[in-house]
Image (tube, rainbow, N blue to C red):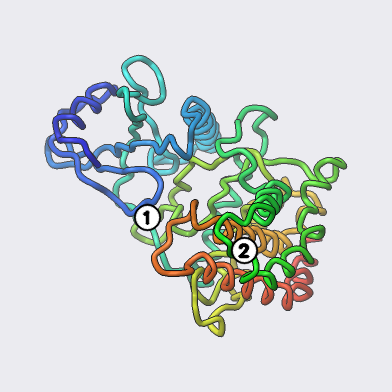
Amino acid sequence: MCKTKEDLLRILDQFQLKEKVVSVEPFGNGHINDTLKVTVENNEVKYVLQRINHLIFNNVDMLQNNIHTVTTHIRRKLEEKGVADIDRKVLTFLPAKDGKNYYFDGDSYWRVCLFIPRSKSYEEVSPELSYEAGKAFGEFQSMLSDLPEGALGETIPNFHNMEFRLQQFHEAIANDPAGRLEEVSSLVEEIEKRADSMCIQERMYREGKLKKRTNHCDTKVNNILFDEEGNVLCVIDLDTVMPGFVLSDIGDFIRTAGNTGAEDDENLDNVRVNIPIFEAYTRGYMETARSFLTPMEIQLLPYGGRLLTYMQTVRFLTDYINGDVYYKIHRPKHNLIRTKAQFKLLQSLEENAEKMDGFMKQWL
């Protein structure tokens, strides 16, 4: 980050802070936004300062309005329930002195939220942690399930739209800009075989059989904060909260946490679906989300895992065909390696589809 301490102090001075800032230091390991922790007098870490990546989130007004709408709605729900220590149960963003939810310095967009003390996150998953994550994301969706239609915008348009991702894929095939199409012809064939069956949610939406909900759209376990005893505090990383289908949120957790291998595992023998993780997450999720789900949504939840894994297979292969222009690569053919690993997970999900679909019958 090419900002001096003096620059950062000037930026912080544009927000409605009450204490004198002592230091501003890098914080966390996020890949999208630049995040810093802000220490005030008495050596207390009090705030988090973020530079928003406006290349990805190019409508910052919409982004910050979404976050304000979501956090305000959740705070009101918690107050109605008489929940204690609310500032640790929902993110609190501070307005800038001009009243906006962010500050633009002429080059970058910035926001400030309260630091949540005595909190931690996890990178590794277990069935026990997956159960808690399921409850957390289900409760998050449940609290937001009564937001009126149109309250939120799409911060990344078509983010989980399978028809759109296939359109991008077909454009890459037609152009073959890096001359790699022949090398991946068998993978292209596998993707095409499944294309029609993987566009179910868009068709059902148009037919009125599936509705859009408020989704987190990045349901990884490290997007939940826990207290010292391992109890859930709140869901964080709200940039991708937007209208979508519930299949996306459970599907992305299955794709990431429910994989026994790595997303870019070169040893495909390592890669398969972790059924205990799927079952634990689903149990937790259904405890808190069942009240607003339709029978059709419940029935389709495991399909969400297949869909999101297929979608990521398509996206990695699209980028490989295009010459690695979107995802950062760290070794030769990295996007092809990722594609093959995701496709192997998809095959495992397909092999276990009957078992996973059958698991949902207890809630139907």
Residue at (48%, 55%) from the top-left corner?
Answer: 327
Indicate the amino acid at tag 1: Asp
Q: Secondary structure at mark 1?
A: loop
Residue drawn 77% across and 41% down? 211
Give the CA separation, mark 1 to mark 2. Answer: 35 Å
- Which residue is under mark 2? 313
Residue at 44% in and 37% down: 55
Can you identify the residue that label 1 sits on?
A: 227
For residue 80, say whether it is visible. no
For the C terminus, give its image quadrant.
Answer: bottom right
Taking the view exactly as shown, the residue that stands out farthest to the top is: 98
Whether residue 170 sits left or right of residue 117 in the image: it is: right
Is residue 228 in view from this perspective?
yes
The N terminus, quarter of image: top left
Going by the image, does 328 lie left or right of 46?
Answer: right
Q: At which x and y percent is residue 208?
A: 85, 40
**Closer to the camera in the image, 72 or 36:** 36
Going 55% across and 59% down the picture, which residue do you hit?
A: 178
Circle 2: residue type? Thr
Q: Is residue 232 above or below residue 62?
A: below
Give residue 33's position: percent from left, percent from top: 37, 43
